[in-house]
Structure formats: C-alpha cells, structure tokens
Image: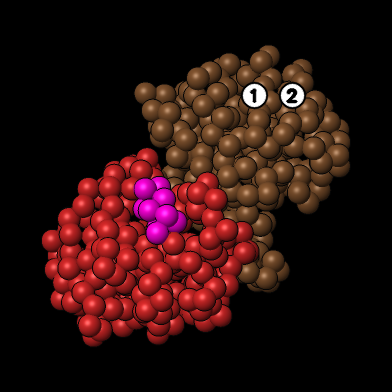
Chain colours: A red, B brown
Amino acid sequence: MKTIGVVLSGCGVYDGAEIHEAVITLLAIDRAGAKALCMAPDVEQLHVVNHLTGEVAEGEKRNVLVESARIARGEIKDIDDVAPDDMDAIILTGGFGAAKNLCTFGVSGPDCEINETVARLIRGMAAARKPIGAMCIAPATVAKAFEGTDKTPKLTIGNDAGTASGIETMGAHHEACPVHDFSVDEENRIVSTPAYMLAGSISEAAEGIEKLVKKVVEMA
Amino acid sequence: MKTIGVVLSGCGVYDGAEIHEAVITLLAIDRAGAKALCMAPDVEQLHVVNHLTGEVAEGEKRNVLVESARIARGEIKDIDDVAPDDMDAIILTGGFGAAKNLCTFGVSGPDCEINETVARLIRGMAAARKPIGAMCIAPATVAKAFEGTDKTPKLTIGNDAGTASGIETMGAHHEACPVHDFSVDEENRIVSTPAYMLAGSISEAAEGIEKLVKKVVEMA
C-alpha cells in the first residue's frame, strides 16, 4: 500500500489548512487504496482569525500541529519526524496556513521565509523522484522550496495575475489552469490544482482535488 | 433549489463537530444540487480538547459558533436566527460536540440537558413534516429533543449497547445498522447512519453519510 504524506498547516481557511481541501484529499487517498500520513510543523500559528467575523483574534495563540490534529483526528506526526523514506508521495493542502505558517508568502510575497523542515522535505522528495502534489495557494510554498535550486517547477495557482507573478519571481513557471483540472510538471513530478483559489463551491474544489490525488497516487 | 440545514457543534471530533463528517455532508449536499445552510449555537464549548494529546486544555475557552465557522468558511448562522421555514430538511453531523455542546449526553447520559433552540428546531422540523438526518452520536441529540413528546423516533447509533440503551431510556427506539447503510423512520421522517460510531476509515464513514444525504434531499 502506498503512503501519501499530507502536509497540514492548522485548521481553518483563514489562519490554517483549508478544511474542505484537507478532508477531500484524505477521502480521495483512502478511496484510491493508499494510506495518508498527516503531518504539520510544531510551531505557533502566525495568528488566529475568528472565522465568523474574519478579524484577527488579538492575543490568542494556537499551535499549527495541535490544530492540524483536529483534521487528522489525532493521527498526525510532527513534520520534523518525517523523512522522504517514510512516504511515496507528498501533498500540500491549501488555505492561508500554507502561506502564513508553512511559508509567509501570504504576508511578504516572493521575499517570504519558509519553514526549513518543509523546504527540506519538499526538496528531498524531488531528489528521490517522488511526486509532489499542491493545491490552492500551497504551490507558492513549493515554489519557495525550489527557489535557488537548478529546477524550474511548473505550477498553477489558478489564474490570479498577482499571485502568479509572485510565484514566477521565486523562479517557478506559472500555468493557468481551470478549477476542475490540474497541471502536471512531468520533469519535476509536481501536480497542482487551483481548488479554492478559483472554486465557487465545494463541488468545484472537489473535482480538481480528486483528480490531483488520483494522479499523484498513480505516479507514486 | 432545496435548502438543507446543517447543524455544527464546533470544529474537531473530541470537543466539536466531527470534521470529516461535516465536510462529507456539505459536499454531498452540493453534489445533490441542494444548498447547505450551516448553523451552530452561539455558546461556549463544554471544554477544549487538545486533539494531539487527547487531553483537556485547562482554562482554554472557545465558542461553538465561532469554531463551527471554520468548517463553514464563515458562511454560518447563529442557530437562534434559524426557523423551520428557512429550510427543507435538517442534518445533524456528529462528533463529541453533538453530545457535549448541543446536548450533554456524552457527559450525563440519558439525564442530559439539551440546548433549547436545538430542541425546538428539531421538534419544529418534525411538526412541519420536514426530514431530519443525524449521524454518529447526533441521534442522541434527536432522541433527547423528542423526549416527552408523543413520538417514538427510530434511530441508529451503530451497535454500541450502552449508547443504544441510553437512547432507548430517552424514549427512542434504537435500530442496529452497519456503517455503509442508514436507518429510516418513515413515520417521523428521520434518517440516521452510524458514521464514525462504527467507521474504521474515512471511506467507510463517507459511504453511509453520502447515502444519508441523498435520502434526506430526496425526502425534502
């Protein structure tokens, strides 16, 4: 049975992992006959957002690994304890957490920082020729991880010109892609889909994510 | 387009709504061509559980509506502002939140209390002959809402003898049901499925939930 790493970044679209994307990914992995290995960094969230009002909850602190455990029903590893040998592929789900907690692209753009373990793991998977999946804004994290290497990852974040330009500044190539489809970088073995960067409904997000997971599991 | 109310109870299996069940429900509603109306009570959670360790986070407080908004991506109503006229059916997702925040069956058993708005809404839907869906432990909430009425709801919580006996003490009839199936009470228009009361995997939970949603939308 293939093991697919799933990188989470909290629990909630505005300050963590996008919950719909994460659950649809876990279901699609299980239905493909593979096993999910959930992981997240044991670090404090950039901030906590009240998802009812959209406002930052001043003074509140939450931990990315602890909140991600909600999506994983407790079955999750500290990403520091995971190596490329532990899995056959890796998928990064979206939500602002990918661009606030895994890297800071959502705050600082292409000059952002990236969590060192996340970057090392992505580059390690690439070095091992194991497929990398990324959805929504998470391709920005993948682009940052590849920045400064001799590789030019081809990725999609949908069709937002500003975000696409930010990804290209980090050395990646952006490919526009509709929400129901995915983009494949055969050379670097990267699969990406826009998900909630473009989706107007949960079904729209699910269509692209289910196709992405199927493709990643096949390639693994 | 039919509107299906979805009652959430926080965000996380151990102190709120079971996230997989909630997302699978929302996706199935959308795929059935219906519209979800998410709602939750604006009350404090019974407690906060660290989902990584399983331990209660002493001193921490979270609000059920605010946390439920994470699953609903901010599109959620205070359940006090929802009436049976606003929807064609209602579905209660599971997770300990249903038995800690909507009612306290998970703590006090059949002698539990129930949130008055939740109880009134369930009885109002029944009076309007609109279908009621419930999964996982949420049938206990439905049983409590019907307690003391002249109706005997038929429900399933899977096959756990202790929980089934608790539901029967509240005046409901428990029907054993496998995880991939659902139980229908034609007289009271209630559909229930065991979901994570029995599921060993997310796919197992999804199979019964998808069937439940299809049935509820058809009946609505």
In the figure, B97 relative to A137: above or below?
above
Magenta highlight range? A210-219
| Disc 2, SS | strand
Q: Position of residue A112 (x, y in %)?
A: 27, 80
Based on the picture, tell me whether residue A214 belongs to the magenta stretch: yes
Secondary element type, mark 1? strand
Dots 1 and 2: beta carbons under 8 Å?
Answer: yes
Q: Which residue is mark 2?
A: B154
Chain ID at mark 1 = B
Q: Considering the image in quadrants, where does the C terminus of chain A appear?
A: bottom left
Q: Is residue A149 shown above or below B3?
A: below
Q: Does residue A214 appear in this view?
A: yes
Q: Which one is in front, B190 or B79?
A: B190
Q: Amino acid at mark 2?
A: Lys
- Structural distance between the alpha carbons of marks 1 and 2: 7 Å
A190 relative to B90, above or below? below
Q: Which residue corresponds to mark 1?
A: B190
Q: Residue at x 15, y 76 (%)?
A: A169
- Chain on which label 2 sits: B
| Residue at left offset 63%, top offset 26% | B191
Which of the pair A50/A88 is nearer the observer? A88
Residue at 83% x, 31% y: name it.
B168
Where is residue A115 shown, x and y percent of the image? Answer: 39, 81
